[in-house]
Amino acid sequence: MNEFELINRLIRSLPTNKSVVAGAGDDCAVLDVGLADRLLLFKTDAVVEGIHFRSDTPPDKIGHKALGRCLSDIAAMAGTPIAALVTLALHANFEPAFIEALYAGMNALARRHEVAIVGGETTTNPERMLLSIAVLGSVPRGKAALRSGAEAGDAIFVTGELGGSLTGKHLEFEPRLEEARWLAQHFSVHAMLDLSDGLAGDLRHILTASRKGAELLSAAIPISRDARRSAKADSSEKPPLLAALTDGEDFELLFTVAARDAVPVLDAWKKQFPTLALTCIGKIIAGEGITLRDKDGARPLTAHGYIHFA
Amino acid sequence: MNEFELINRLIRSLPTNKSVVAGAGDDCAVLDVGLADRLLLFKTDAVVEGIHFRSDTPPDKIGHKALGRCLSDIAAMAGTPIAALVTLALHANFEPAFIEALYAGMNALARRHEVAIVGGETTTNPERMLLSIAVLGSVPRGKAALRSGAEAGDAIFVTGELGGSLTGKHLEFEPRLEEARWLAQHFSVHAMLDLSDGLAGDLRHILTASRKGAELLSAAIPISRDARRSAKADSSEKPPLLAALTDGEDFELLFTVAARDAVPVLDAWKKQFPTLALTCIGKIIAGEGITLRDKDGARPLTAHGYIHFA
């Protein structure tokens, strides 16, 4: 039994109750606690020293990233965050100034999005720092953007530019909360998530949940300057397109809308968010898997998101 | 600046918003999200291998303890848990059977109290396992039992028997959810918390929040058989009374009610919960600190909960 089989087996046997609208498996859990107009969103996420950040990462950026990841998951549901709890597991010799800077990064992000930080816990993890955040949010009934709603013919969109996040963006991204809420208010978003594992891997989450396939247009995929620069500077780096498809931690929105909404979404977006790119990168099709189309034809992406190069 | 000064400084500068009824500093955060009849409770808690459990602790008991600690905090507010998220940070070589057993312990406790487990996250913590749980609950408006409501003259009660938890109870306790809700429904509970740091330390949390003092009756404090047995078997162990005052992780309820409610509470409790002890151990007084009274007179408890023995 591998890790994924184990997790699937565990998920099937989790206790549930009448409040659960969506449990494990989407960006957030969705709960109905009896609010007339809204459902609650509930999410937790952890970052670990040496894995999600380095020992020399500036502490304000660690705090920003830890909270930002959770807020990005609330954005992925088209929700609004309400409150967060912070669990900080620290080695014995931490510096108070380090913790203050970490909170400064977290607090600045929380204030921008009107999220209250309502407590948490400090405990000991002797070998490395671990920071776990729990966030509570809400979403208007009928507006929660799940992963499972993509339909054949839908246009697939991404915000921003992809790839090369490790050169800096993974510590500085802004969760797309305002953008996601605006989308859900003005259009019927069929499926949405935030890009954390990389476009190819995350699109597959939508396809699996929706039981569909996708065709991407190679030339349409927005590649970040960081990904282009890395590839140019070092020939052992991923080619830019591969970086845009497979690098993780972009924290941009990936969503689908009906084909008839594709042009109206683009037009309205440009007026509303003139400084943030929105790009149609392909379409949802019947079937399964991802096909990448370029001037030489169409080729499948493998399960791990890598392209078979000729 | 020590750890407590740092935490106090951090707490003062946390972002807040209009949903926050009580932030950091009580057993749970209390949030008003617009439910007509209820407030939400929000809490997170972590257990760490080598600190809260041993490497050879049976995994079902680790799961039970991790969730139980959070549910005990919901009980401390007289609330009802709704849903939980589980963050599991694991070393690389974990056994699937270990994780399944851990979830079995957690799931059994969750089912007994009708708590949904709605997801979470698995991440890596190479040197030791860490398990962080976030719980969402609710409490009827006006019924949340805070730490700050104790009044001079109040009778102080504890459920169960105290001390010696490390011999086993810390892994097997049942959170006092039903008992706490019943108390809040039938009586005006002035202040309540769950005993995690030990009676002397936790009572001080109530006294500090309520700006009061307390007088405890030495002979009234219910001492567990485990604490008596440990002291008898090994003269280097704490005397039983000291164990009952200062051992942590009893996860019993400590609460105060007006003096006129003391006898009615005891009478009604005996009918409702005939197998669980409820004991009046003293009273709230004006002033500050804790005084312990026995046949030889009254003596203060020190800041760390230890008795000055003559």
Image: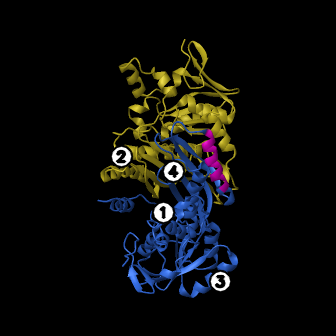
Chain colours: A blue, B yellow
Point out residue B58 in the picture as x, y percentages from the top left corner. 34, 42
Q: Residue at x 49, y 38 (%)?
A: B251
The circle on residue B234 is none
> Type of residue at label 2?
Asp
* Residue depth check, mark 1 versus mark 4: number of the one nearer the observer: 4
**Disc 2 on helix, strand or loop?**
helix
* Residue B105 seen from this side: yes
The circle on residue A267 is 3
The stretch of residues the image draws in magenta is A96-108
**Hey, which quadrant is residue A108 in on the image?**
bottom right
> Type of residue at label 3?
Asp
**Hey, which quadrant is residue A288 in on the image?**
bottom left
**Disc 3 on helix, strand or loop?**
helix
The circle on residue A54 is 4
- Compared to residue B293, the image places residue B141 above or below, namely below
Asked whether the residues under the numbered discs 4 and 2 touch, taking CB atoms below 8 Å apart as contact, a structural biologist would say no
Q: Is residue A99 magenta?
A: yes
The circle on residue B60 is 2
Decide: few, some or many residues near mark 3? Use Cα within 10 Å; few <14, some 14-19, many ≥20. Answer: few
The image quadrant where one finds the C terminus of chain B is top right
> Type of residue at label 1?
Lys
Q: Is residue B219 left or right of residue A60?
A: left
